[in-house]
Amino acid sequence: MRLPNRRLFIGCTAIILAGAAGFWLGRRDIDTGGEIRPSAPLIGISSVTGDHYVRAVRDSGGIPVVLPDTDGSPEKIEEYLTCLDGLLMPGGADIPPSEYGEEPHPTVVVLDDDRYQFEKALSRAWIERSDKPLLGICLGSQWINVTSGGSLVQDIPSELGSNHRNTTHAVSLEEDSRLRRIFEETTFEVNSTHHQAVGKLGRNLRIVARSPDGVIEATETTDPDRFLIGVQWHPEKLMPDDRRQAKLLKAFIEAARDGVLEP
């Protein structure tokens, strides 16, 4: 394997150290031709400020690396594509409806511009130029759909007549989906804190879960060889008490680990 160029080597080393700081795994490292990488996968978490996502990745066997959206700059995305083994896109405010060609509903509260610009560039690069695992949660799930050319229901209560904010409800999973294989169940209760959802489905995606009122609750890629899943609920908040939801994070980390351990 060719040695990485100096700039990329330094960048990857910094990313690895940032993720490994304070997180002792006690696992052997892998020498990839001059680049020493831990055998646990490096999982980028975009723009996150809370600790639920970090804990969920850590407790599921990954090394969490928070990706800052400072100045909305896409400068480091090339290095993230190379150095990281998986990407988790977390929840947040709303994607500007101009991204999918619509005027904003009065209830829309858009992302701050730095996060918007950064996650727009990051999601596009990760989906289009990488085959590495991607897990989108709430807003992250919506980014997957919009980046893939889809649209959103801007306000579930006024457009669909139901409430998905600060409540719980059931979801039903498609039998032949990756998500169904992960959970090994077809119906269960989830938390719900969103007022938007997938509208028009994006390219190369399929609907794999709905709530009883028909709202789309999860999508995944049509590529059977790739882990790319978006869910509207928050499994990271249900962990560690709900062992069922831990399955999703663990499956995501395992998919990322498979890439680390490839010869």
Image (cartoon, rainbow, N blue to C red):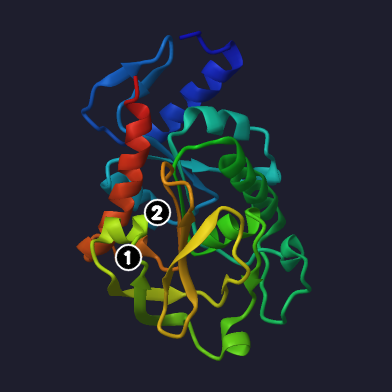
**For residue 185, side relative to residue 75 (left or right):** left
Give coordinates of residue 109: x percent, y percent: 66, 72
Are there few (<14), some (14-19), or many (20+) residues within 10 Å of tag 2? many
Residue placed under numbered mark 2 in the picture: 53
Give coordinates of residue 142: x percent, y percent: 57, 62
> Disc 2 marks which amino acid?
Tyr
At 43% from the left and 10% from the top, the residue drawn is: 34
Q: Which is closer to the viewer, label 2 or label 1?
A: 1
Residue 68 image-quadrant placement = top right
* As drawn, 233 above or below 161: above
> Disc 1 marks which amino acid?
Glu
The answer for how far apart the CA atoms under marks 2 and 1 are is 28 Å
Secondary structure type for disc 1? loop
Tell me the tag on residue 26: none
The answer to whether residue 21 is visible is no
Give coordinates of residue 212: x percent, y percent: 40, 84
At 57% from the left and 41% from the top, the residue drawn is: 126
Q: Are marks 2 and 1 in contact (CB under 8 Å)?
A: no
Name, please, the residue furthest toward the bottom: 161
Are there few (<14), some (14-19), or many (20+) residues within 10 Å of tag 1? some
Residue 101 image-quadrant placement = bottom right
Secondary structure type for disc 2? helix
Q: Foreground: 181 or 45? A: 181
At 41% from the left and 41% from the top, the residue drawn is: 225
Residue placed under numbered mark 1 in the picture: 175
Q: Foreground: 188 or 67? A: 188
* As drawn, 180 above or below 34: below
Q: Earlier in the sequence, mark 2 or mark 1?
A: 2
* As drawn, 212 above or below 108: below
The answer to whether residue 102 is visible is yes
